[in-house]
Amino acid sequence: MKILWVDLVSELGGAQRSLLDVAQKLILEPDIELSVAVPHGPLASRLSASGIPVHPVTPVRATRRVGGFFSTVFKLLFASNDFSRVVRSVKPDIIHANALPSFLAVVRPARKIPVFWHVRDLRQPVPLMREASHKATHIIAPSEAVAEYLAETLSRQVYSSICTIPNGIDTETFRPRDSAEARVKFGLPEDVPVIGMVAHFVKWKNHAVFLDMAALLKKTYPAAQFVLVGRDLFHEAGKYIRSLKTQANELGLNDSVRFIENCDDAQEIIPAFTVLVHPAIGEPFGRVVCEAMACEVPVVAIDSAGPQEILNNGKTGILCETDSADKLAEGVSRLLSDEVLRKQFAKTACEAVLARYSINRVANDLAALYRKTLDYISSDRQRGQFTD
């Protein structure tokens, strides 16, 4: 069977990394002929390096600037023309759209081809979501939090098309590594606590709360180092990053905070951390939580959405009721003050990720869904029942 994955983003955000990881596993399935339609850029380069056929298309990103909605719609019309060409070339049996813009761009050229809509965000225009939901063969949620959001937002008529397939990570890439080696690579001191955050520089990730937490922890752990790792993915966050650096300066953290803005591979830096903190609220899944767990780095996160499902509070990590700096500092202090507990969390967390969040499981679940869909369509066509 021929599967065409599509994405309109060229950079390696979380959704694109999830696509890359699962694509590298799906190409190993003997009955799947996989290709991907994406714009030129880092994602396309990594897919090509993995031996996956890539079809270039026009990049499209939604923008919140004045007139941004109309600009996005205009770009999607051009993207549809790109996809018409790709669909004619590939002749896929199934099209898998990696997020809402990709789905909207490809659904018209798809015609009678079944199209899967992979929901990657909890922040999307509801009218467009409802329109898309009636055209999707399957709507895939990467967490129960996203599935619940879809059930609350969409019509009852589409409930049966929603299925939950939790994201996975490559546990061969994200695995326990030598902390001292990682610290040397990034110039971090060896014998002090290092508390890290890994997230692209966008406001809803709550970097400012992380810095407020750092100021509180510094009173008890004056030698501790705090590391913010991320990228300005679309070159739009310069003002935000400057505001964070100003905040760090005003909090007296200049000697304690490191900004690492160009680290593409989290597996290299996460092992350097004593604790990883994830202060975002409304995280659809939380890849970095799983990545830290797989590296045997204990996690403190907010008790909401994706991380709430991933972490078993008090056993595989610590969940805080709110995103207050005080609560996050309490969670981190609990781990820093108890090495036995820290190691216990690290071990059980790694075991939990291996059991539930491996990329092999995701690929197997998707491959099974592809087969089931085509079998169902084939049997319906034989009875003359299949329609658009």
Image (cartoon, helix red, strand yellow):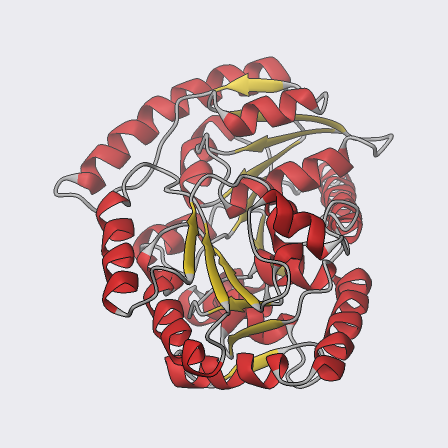
Expressed as whole percent of the image width and height from the top left, the position of residue 198 reads 50, 55
At 77% from the left and 47% from the top, the residue drawn is 372
At 70% from the left and 54% from the top, the residue drawn is 180
Q: How many marks?
A: 0
At 46% from the left and 75% from the top, the residue drawn is 222
- Residue farthest to the left, as pictured: 66
As drawn, 183 above or below 82: below
Determine the image quadrant of residue 271: bottom right
As drawn, 369 above or below 82: below
At 59% from the left and 67% from the top, the residue drawn is 192
Q: Is residue 377 left or right of residue 72?
A: right
Whether residue 50 is visible here, answered yes or no, is: yes
Q: Is residue 199 left or right of residue 50?
A: left
251 vs 86, nearest the viewer: 251
123 vs 357, nearest the viewer: 357
Expressed as whole percent of the image width and height from the top left, the position of residue 48 reads 64, 20
- Residue farthest to the right, as pictured: 30
As drawn, 115 above or below 332: above
Q: Is residue 254 left or right of residue 117?
A: left
Determine the image quadrant of residue 217: bottom left
Whether residue 388 is visible here, answered yes or no, is: no
Determine the image quadrant of residue 210: bottom left
273 vs 256, nearest the viewer: 256
111 vs 192, nearest the viewer: 192
Expressed as whole percent of the image width and height from the top left, the position of residue 330 reads 50, 86
Q: Is residue 152 left or right of residue 194?
A: left
- Indicate the quadrant containing the N terminus: top left, top right, bottom left or bottom right: top right
- Indicate the quadrant containing the C terminus: top left, top right, bottom left or bottom right: top right
Expressed as whole percent of the image width and height from the top left, the position of residue 285 reads 55, 61
